[in-house]
Amino acid sequence: MKRFITVASMLVLTAGLSFAAEYTGFVTDAKCAAGGKAGAGHAGCAKSCITGGEAAVIVTADGKVLEVSNQDKVTALAGEKVKVTGTEADGKLTVTAIEKAS
């Protein structure tokens, strides 16, 4: 019984880690995001850099930079403001849904 309670407690405590979160921000390249560059005025550079092989990231309104594990989900929207749903693990965001935001 003690083992059951321990396992059940662990499941309850870690259940929140697997839930999807929603973010709004801009798809930009990792190099420019590290330098604080993102947003509508940076769209052309972001598209160019991502097309050139730089990793795409999401930069939220509060400046948080989210590394993306599945690049194929976000590269088509380089430079765009997006609403992203996904899960974070090991410091990276796995995108499950993405759409343009207003």
Image (cartoon, rainbow, N blue to C red):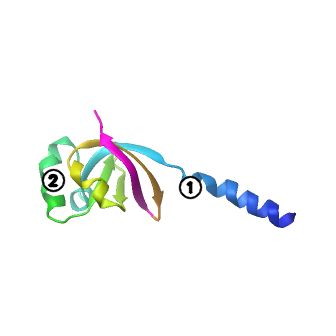
Q: Looking at the image, can residue 29 be seen?
A: yes
Around disc 2, counting alpha carbons within 10 Å, would you say few (fewer than 14), some (14 to 19), or many (20 or more)?
Answer: many
> Does 100 sit above or below residue 96?
above
Residue 33 lies left or right of residue 4; in this view the side is left
Q: Which of 69 and 66 is in front in this view?
A: 69
Residue 10 lies left or right of residue 47; in this view the side is right
Label 2 SS:
helix
**Magenta region, mostly helix, strand or loop?**
strand
Q: Looking at the image, can residue 37 be seen?
A: no
Label 1 SS:
helix
Residue type, numbered disc 2: Lys
Of labels 1 and 2, earlier in sequence is 1
Q: Tell me how many marks there are.
A: 2
Range of magenta residues: 91-102
Query: What label does residue 84 carry, if any?
Result: none
Image coords of residue 43 (percent x, y): 16, 47
Q: Do the residues labelled 1 and 2 touch (CB within 8 Å)?
A: no
Quadrant that contains the N terminus: bottom right
- Where is mark 2, residue-wise? 47
Could you tell me which residue is drawn at 47 percent across and 65 percent down? 90
Around disc 1, counting alpha carbons within 10 Å, would you say few (fewer than 14), some (14 to 19), or many (20 or more)?
Answer: few
Residue type, numbered disc 1: Leu
Q: Nearer the viewer, residue 96 or 14?
A: 96
Query: What label does residue 17 carry, if any?
Result: 1
Examine the structure image and report whether residue 10 is included in the region drawn in magenta: no
Could you tell me which residue is drawn at 41 percent across and 57 percent down? 94
Examine the structure image and report whether residue 95 is included in the region drawn in magenta: yes
